[in-house]
Amino acid sequence: MINANLHELGQALAQRQVSSVELTRLFLDRAQRLNPRLNAFVTLDPEASLAQARAADERIDRGQGQALTGIPIALKDIFLTKGWLTTCASKILSNFVAPYDAHVVEKLQAAGAVNLGKTNMDEFAMGSSSETSHYGPVKNPWDCEAVPGGSSGGSAAAVAGRLAPAALGTDTGGSIRQPAALCGISGLKPTYGAVSRYGMVAFASSLDQCGPMAKSAADLALLLTAVAGFDARDATSLERQSEDYGRELERSLAGLRIGLPSEYFGAGLAPDVGRAVQAAIAEYEKLGCRLVEVSLPQTRLSIPAYYVLAPAEASSNLARFDGVRYGYRAPEYTDLRDMYMKTRAQGFGAEVKRRILIGTYVLSHGYYDAYYLQAQKVRRLIALDFAEAFKRCDVIMGPTSPTTAFKLGTKTADPVQMYLNDIYTVPAPLAGIPALSIPCGFGDAHLPVGLQIMGNYFQEARMLNVAHQYQRATDWHVRTPAGFD
Amino acid sequence: MRIAQLARLEISSGEAQQALSQLQAIFALIEELQSVDTQRIEPMSHAQDVSLRLREDRVSEGDQHELFQSVAPQVDAGLYLVPKVVE
């Protein structure tokens, strides 16, 4: 049951082979037993989860169950969940009980899914390793001395370790795809605006997107269908017809043109990762695809552009944490300004403070044009690169991460080293295009490797088809880490 | 640091030293942005060419201040309590 996909779980529940209470208990027990090894969860509330499971069972008994009814799903601790602690892995929200549900949480509730618990992450989603959490680092189930990736590391570790059948994460510069790659699971970042950000704590508002993390592309399709769609409460939410993202899963790949950007296969890519990705591409040729060489010339500028835009937006978004209306307040202060200064100095971790300082600087008087405006222009160049490439191919493929999971503590001394990890994942959010990662093999030391698939705007259904057909022909996505099977 | 003041973050001079050297490395990274010519390029803030939606000027939200203030550090009679501003 712990390895079952969402469709199988749905069937078992509908046929009453298992109840939601039994299924939720199964995962809660695993979570409680195995979480000390992974630190994947910040909050588990068995009573609350089981109450939801009981309601789901009643609904199924009434014949009103849907695809996700009764299935426990883990939620990154960046989504507001009414009545539950919502911390963003930060001391400054360590006492914050959310007064309302995020839009995507409401959607999952309406579908009858069960909240399994809140997963650990990099503080305020700023990081690529899940090491900056106030609650301690998350471990990778494939190697408990290695990082799971970030910032959705808790969600990735929970799914990979089979503590949860699926999870929601968020992706701003790669925070769903990179941990999915490092943990050997599947994860997708939708087209910007496809999923509502209402109730999702904002890091960089023009880049953030909620997305599914699970063991297969078919599961991703189910979850994305459940949470996507227009929401008037999110000013950036796009008004479009709702979609069944699984509608094209079984389409043949014959004639599919796969673009391979030369910039993604050059210096900086670890040989073991390159080998696994090349093997995956060869597999796609067997499925009838045609390979096309493309170029994304502005790739090298995507990191500087991202590390101007994201911190700038973050410095604005995190200004609200001041100890007045919610969250941590410093115990001692002289006046209002001092309260702000001390609350924020004590409440935020080092990486968050670094990014707030960078953001404040690049937006400050005299620097705005040279940095923020310039980055916005480079952003358009990056989007134009993709538009040009998609004239000659249907999807773009490459590695998700330049290396496999690195050991805990090995990249924390030099922020720039950590940032350079994001080279393959930051372009997609800058352009606003959808991108996903699926497991495609193992590198040295038996650590998972992820294949990234990028598509043009609104191409999620086709991309999931491309991922699914590969998962029908291979079995990387069903491998389980030792000690978690 | 002036920037720390703007960001309302208290930083000791020791922390400021360490932060500065890390920030300088990040600024060196960001300088690469100047290497490309963007004279005729429009800045991009949103992937889709959309403008802000407008809605009817009708009240749609109710008063939930008790719920929202239940998480506040210090509240009295519907007001948030904060220390004096000293000028």
Image (cartoon, coloured by chain):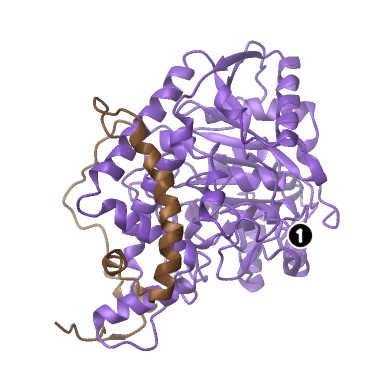
On the image, the x and y values in percent for residue A193 come to 40, 40
Residue under pointer 1 = A144
Nearer to me, B6 or A175: B6
On the image, the x and y values in percent for residue B28 come to 41, 47
Identify the residue at image location x=52%, y=70%: A84
A195 sits left or right of B72 in the view: right
Nearer to me, B77 or A8: B77
Q: Secondary structure under badge 1?
A: loop
Identify the residue at image location x=47%, y=60%: A124
Identify the residue at image location x=78%, y=55%: A143
User: Is any atom of residue A18 visible in this view?
Assistant: yes
Q: Mark 1 is on which residue type? A: Cys
Nearer to me, A420 or A39: A420
User: Is any atom of residue A327 visible in this view?
Assistant: no
Q: Quadrant of residue A101?
A: bottom left
User: Which chain is disc 1 placed on?
Assistant: A
Q: Which chain is brown?
A: B
Classify B60 as above or below A340: above
Chain A pictured colour: purple
On the image, the x and y values in percent for residue A424 come to 55, 36
